[in-house]
Image: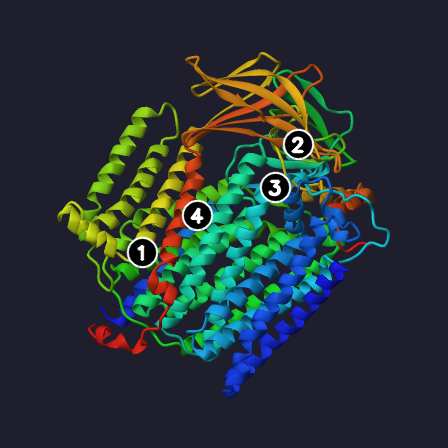
Amino acid sequence: MIAELGHYALMLALGLALIQGSMPIIGTRSNDPVLMTMATPTALAQFAFVATAFGALAVCYVTSDFSVLNVYENSNSAMPLIYRLTSVWGNHEGSMMLWVFILALFGALLAAFGNNLPAKLKANALAVQAWIAAAFHLFILTTSNPFLRIVDAPNEGRDLNPILQDPGLAFHPPLLYLGYVGFSIAFSFAIAALLEGRIDAAWARFVRPWVLAAWMCLTLGIAGGSYWAYYELGWGGFWFWDPVENASLMPWLAGTALLHSAVVMEKRAALKVWTILLAILAFSLSLIGTFLVRSGVLTSVHAFAIDPRRGIFILAILVLFIGGALSLYAWRAPLLKQGGLFAPISREGALVLNNLFLTAACATVFVGTLYPLALEALTGEKISVGPPFFNETFAPLFVPLLLAMPFGPLLGWKRGDLLGAAQRLLAAAMLAAVAVAASFALQHGGPVLAPFGVGLAIFVMAGALVDIAERTMILRIPLGAAWRRAAGLPRSAWGTALAHFGIGVTLMGIVAVTAWSSERIAELKPGGIIDVARYRLTFDGLFSRTGPNYRDLVGHFTVRRTTGDLVGVMEPSRRSFPARNMATTEAALMTLGVSQLYVSLGDSNPDGSIPVRLYFKPQVLMIWLGALVMFAGGALSLSDRRLRIGAPRPAKAQPALEAAE
Amino acid sequence: MTRKRRRLLLIGGGVGVLAIALALMLNAFRDSIVFFNSPSDVAEKHIGPGTRIRLGGLVKAGSVVRSDNLKIRFEVTDGSRDIPVAYQGVLPDLFREGQGVVAEGMLDGSGVFKADSILAKHDETYMPKEVADALKKSGHWKDDYAQRAAMPTGGSKK
């Protein structure tokens, strides 16, 4: 009954989306305010129905209703409640439900809180939002219906893929989708602006909070996914350049670029055409990411071959939306008026540089991810483009970007003083130089480039501090006065500095782990000893433990410093899930400051020995802490009053300033 | 500076950065692409020692021999031909006899494939996609692979 309710609610949501996608557009064409305002209630109602459908599916999962095929295939009544709930989106159908749920949520938020938007812009944007929703509702209903029943209901479900039975599943997909789908708002605004053929600085002001919120979620989602892969896969890697990861990185790069170009557009009414393009691209890349992950083209070609309808349907959505948006762009963008002028050395110029490098880096990831697919489709030749490709292309593009980053906020709008900015960054550069020298002195036998990486990270972090120091004039004026200046700084300034600082933190972690982590692999018998870095682990033996729906074979390790002090115990395990006859490696982690010890087990041998993989990962936690700092920076910026209120300034106030050529 | 010159500078910068990115990509493509081959491909294409490839197929049942220090030897088969593989290290969770495997490395002079990594594709279908395609090509694809593969994702079947 519940499942049928959900199914029915989803069909009604499709109907509402069709109304929401057509009436307001007709309204804007015929200047009919009634039709235009129809967008708001339909968006809210559509969300209510999608939420009902999603809730119905969740209820089926929580109550373990195995007469629903989707629940039977992906759940098991022995699983703890949290996994029964999260397995809603641990499979194709449910994850598409989460996608449309978040899409409808964003539409509803825009409808509810977009009261200060110009009526036409709001109506058009909500209509575009509804087109996307309608396409995906239709996709779910025709090819990925999660509400199908089984005639003879089995007593027990087939269990969730064990790798997904992890708290990571509770956070990672929803955050990622909040990011992906969040960019749909920017996309809808861009299309709305193109439909209207009119755009001004206020447009950027409306869009920025949405882009920022999506970017924050995506940042956290990617970082969370990376940490999850790090501890779950048992290899201790934090980033694999896997197509699925790249699928989330590409929208992040485009979104980061969009975030920065929207600032230029808001403050200086420049880069309009470019910003619109980025808004289209960011969401297009999100759609491509969805296609890569959801069509099955990557993970298993036979899933695609058995049921090609899904892949072809998503491909059709992709072509329709991306192709349509870009055609509309090519047709209408020339209508948009040119914006303010700026010298190459200026805040705008720095942001343009940021955009160039981010989009170029995004392009390399795009080519590296899709080239093997294209080659296979065209010639049948199978190749793999591994981490070396990305390291050789992505890193060289990011280094100049990061070197330039601290300069950006120190340059003035319109015309900047590069020499002055360099002088102000002198302290940061000196600190970085000291860090390079110190790491050279401390490292024995690491890569030559690593100390420079540390120097770059320090430069980025110190550069962010210099930005704040300059704005508060701390050390130059009395402390009290500086404090008052600090309190008066807009939160977005603090947010910028914090987010930039976070990049440095992440970079530091990446450099340290890549250059200086140590790895030991050995087969140990009880009593065996294994050393790594300054630590010595003693293998005390194996014991077994029973969980709700699995059995653990646990290795017990005692950790001591090489000096002999006891540090603690670590208990990695091999976890076997009888329902799927599958085993996973549960690594044990021990956090020491921001570094970690990492132990994972292989399959035990008949003679009682077990392969052990031991890593010392220096400063590894900084990778994800940096992402948290970036998130915090975004949050601070989002809480800025100017963004929150989003009051459109009269767009005409600018030209007086710009006339001076 | 006039508007035109500024725009030229902007476009020039953009083209410059893109050119750099393109150069980096072409350079990286030259030395970091690894081709996938099945055992039959290796024989047909006369892939010699020293060429880095990915070798994919099934772990031949009964061929796995473990020795000290995590050394392992096994044979990769596509039904028509077998190639012996030597590897040292911890094997991924999904490594099993009779299941699909992808090994990356190169052949040595004696015809043994020295793998430096055994792919841990955490694929719920047990079957790396390249392996599935290679098996289909060589005619050794069995339908139960497809069924096993389809079960966890499922959805459309009744």
Q: In this view, does A495 lie above or below A48?
A: above
Q: Could you say which disc has been placed on residue B35 in the image?
A: 3
Q: Distance between the residues labelled 4 and 2?
A: 36 Å
Instruction: Give the secondary structure at mark 2.
Output: loop
Q: Mark 2 packing: few (<14 Cα in 10 Å), some, or many (20+)?
A: some
Relative placement, left or right, of A416 versus A562 is left
Q: Earlier in the sequence, mark 4 or mark 3?
A: 4
Q: Chain letter of disc 3?
A: B
- Mark 1 or 2, closer to the camera: 1
The residue beneath circle 2 is B93
- Structural distance between the alpha carbons of marks 4 and 3: 20 Å
The answer to whether A116 is drawn above or below residue A589 in the figure is: below
The image shows a total of numbered marks equal to 4
**Disc 1: CA contacts within 10 A as few (<14), some (14-19) or many (>=20):** many
Same chain for marks 4 and 3? Answer: yes
In the displayed structure, would residue A93 be above or below residue A605? below
Mark 1 lies on residue: A491
The disc, 2 or 3, on the residue closer to the chain's N-terminal end is 3
Do discs 2 and 3 share a chain?
yes
How far is disc 2 from disc 3 in space, using C-alphas?
24 Å
Q: In which quarter of the image is the N terminus of chain A?
A: bottom right
Q: Name the residue under label 4.
A: B24
Q: What residue type is labelled 4?
A: Leu
